Amino acid sequence: MAAASSTTTTAWRCCLLLALVLPMISSFAAGDDAPPLPMTPSYYSKSCPTLEAIVRGTMVSAIKAERRMGASILRLFFHDCFVQGCDASILLDDVQGFVGEKTAGPNANSIRGYEVIDKIKANVEAACPGVVSCADILALAAREGVNLLGGPSWEVPLGRRDSTTASKSEADSDLPGPSSSLADLIAAFGKKGLAPRDMTALSGAHTIGYAQCQFFRGHIYNDTNVDPLFAAERRRRCPAASGSGDSNLAPLDDMTALAFDNAYYRDLVGRRGLLHSDQELFNGGSQDERVKKYSTDPDLFAGDFVAAMIKMGKICPLTGAAGQIRKNCRVVSSS
């Protein structure tokens, strides 16, 4: 693990300050007395006016080459924000004397899309050298991945800077896993300032993408809250024996695997959640009613998903003079 630096200290101070200041901010009336927001969608309007067009154009090409990439970039953003905040720490490679997050349990041989972010960064640097952070590029790319697969779009608050550290240990401890219980999920998201409603909406990201057999084997063979026909179908490509077919893929949403919609929640109501953690959202617990609502109201889901994405994107960002703007998203830039 990388040694702590001023960037790490700043990030944790940010988290603490956020917890202390948010209640005070809410007491301000809207208007001139309200404190300025640290990030804004127009952050690069003068310094890099073509930024969003570049990100979208590169994502169009990436998804045209492989539609699954939209889901991969969305997951990459989620895994970044849950470790040290949305600071692009997940993009840093291991080098001598520095251990990044790519080899952490939840990321190793699972997280994808680094090359797409590299391509976007190169295209942005060609137009606006030294201006746009990798953290902001990742946030924008995640939005485009959702929208290009049929999901909503939204204004992304910008102004994040890039960390100079990473935390493999925090990636191992803070990222919820496929075997998480509902209580585990609520606690993990709550630790990041996200409410149960946010958690259930963000879980809808599983309406796109795939999971490896090793992550859902326990659910389809051992859990009882699974539709028998669904379990039998998934077992065909996921043998019971550990080590056999571990990397075989199955869609997280068996209705529309590469279309961003609310079918994931209909899967859950029908006991066809692929992961144990998915089905936990609809298993006699506190989120059952919300899952039912999302399963019949795609607009409600889309609205809550957007709100939760914006909220997640504000988890302890480095802003102002904190952090840096990396030239290469994979390595810390020398001062």
Image (cartoon, grey):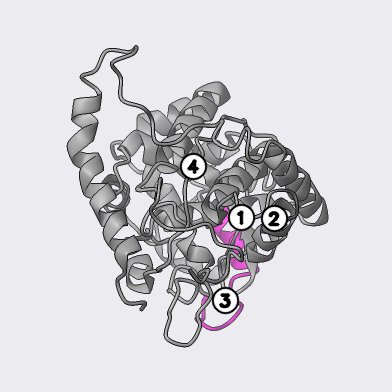
Residues drawn in magenta: 228-246
How many numbered callouts? 4
Label 2 crowd (10 A; few <14 / some 14-19 / many >=20)? some
Q: Determine if residue 170 is in view.
A: yes
Among the two numbered marks 1 and 3 on one chain, the one whose residue lies closer to the N terminus: 1
Q: Is residue 236 magenta?
A: yes
Label 1 crowd (10 A; few <14 / some 14-19 / many >=20)? some
Q: Residue tagged by mark 3?
A: 246
Task: Tell me the CA gap for discs 4 and 1.
Answer: 13 Å
Q: Amino acid at mark 3?
A: Asp
Q: Amino acid at mark 1?
A: Gly
Marks 1,2: beta carbons within 8 A: yes
Q: Residue tagged by mark 4?
A: 159
Q: Is 189 or 165 nearer to us in this picture? A: 165
Rendered view: 243 above or below 228: below
Task: Tell me the CA gap for discs 1 and 3.
Answer: 42 Å
Q: Position of residue 180 (x, y in %)?
A: 34, 58
Q: Residue tagged by mark 1?
A: 130
Task: Tell me the CA gap for discs 4 and 2.
Answer: 16 Å
Q: Amino acid at mark 2?
A: Glu
Label 3 crowd (10 A; few <14 / some 14-19 / many >=20)? some
Q: Residue tagged by mark 2?
A: 125
